[in-house]
Image: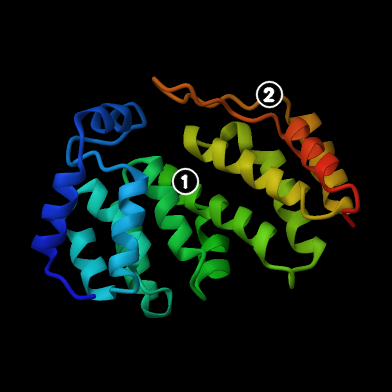
Amino acid sequence: MTATVEHVMDELERFGTEHNRTVYRRHGVGDSQFGVSFANLATLAKKYQHSQVLAEHLWNSGNHDARLLATMIADPKAVTSALVESWRQSLDNYVITDAFTGLVAKTSLCRRKMERWTKAKAEWTSRAGFGLLAHLAMRDGTLPNAFFTEYVDLIEREIHHRKNRTRDAMNSALIAIGIRNTELERRAIAAAKRIGAVEVDHGETGCKTPDAIDYIQRVKERKPNQS
């Protein structure tokens, strides 16, 4: 389905609520937003899926909700490295960063960007990098354990020295690696024991940082035949 960016922006504005705007502000989203629920964004995404040109125009609007929708309707096969890098440079909160990461994870750029971005000092870039690492741990069955053990060592070595929201993503990546198979579970749990508590400031929200050991073990209990 084709539509003008003005039409879609009008739809987004109609779906927005003050309640959602207040909630999203608590999660670090700025004032350029309508406050559209993810349920309504999903409805719009079904209408405009794989609308690459529209996605690019929506992102360029600078509006938070429009950018979320852009990540949902962009065509992964049409997303270029140059576009990804352009969008990455304008990330400004963890909500849009995670949505952006979800898009990049669907592209052929996933591993290459992960390897580069996990080394970055910038908070949102590095968060995206470790988000991609988690995706690879959960979705890419072709990668050997040795690939992930290097990142377990990196996480253990650097997690307490990285920026706030990066620490959160590193902890999630460690969990994802730990639930991949039994060998990586042992490596991840051993690293988590040495790491100890991971402090993340979640702002004025009820979010909490999951305990990696507890989370991995609970997943193991639900998957007793994990190999």
Which numbered tag is attached to residue 197? Answer: 2
Provide the residue designation for mark 1: 121
Q: Nearer the viewer, residue 172 or 149?
A: 172
Q: Secondary structure at mark 2?
A: loop
Q: Is residue 95 left or right of residue 215?
A: left
Q: x%, y% of residue 91?
A: 33, 49
Does the residue at mark 1 contact the one at mark 2 (Cβ under 8 Å)?
no
The residue drawn where x is 36% and y is 47% is: 39
The residue drawn where x is 46% and y is 56% is: 101
Q: Dividing the image into 4 quarters, which one contains the N terminus? A: bottom left
Residue 19's place in the image compared with 222, above or below, is above
1 vs 2, front mark: 2
Q: Amino acid at mark 1?
A: Lys
Q: x%, y% of residue 27?
A: 36, 31
Q: x%, y% of residue 152?
A: 73, 48
Which numbered tag is attached to residue 80? Answer: none
Q: How many marks?
A: 2
Q: Secondary structure at mark 1?
A: loop
Among numbered discs 1 and 2, the one appearing first in the sequence: 1
The residue drawn where x is 82% and y is 36% is: 217
Q: x%, y% of residue 136?
A: 64, 61
Q: Is residue 61 left or right of residue 100?
A: left
Q: CA distance from mark 1 to mark 2?
A: 22 Å
Residue 20's place in the image compared with 44, above or below, is above
Q: Dividing the image into 4 quarters, which one contains the C terminus? A: bottom right
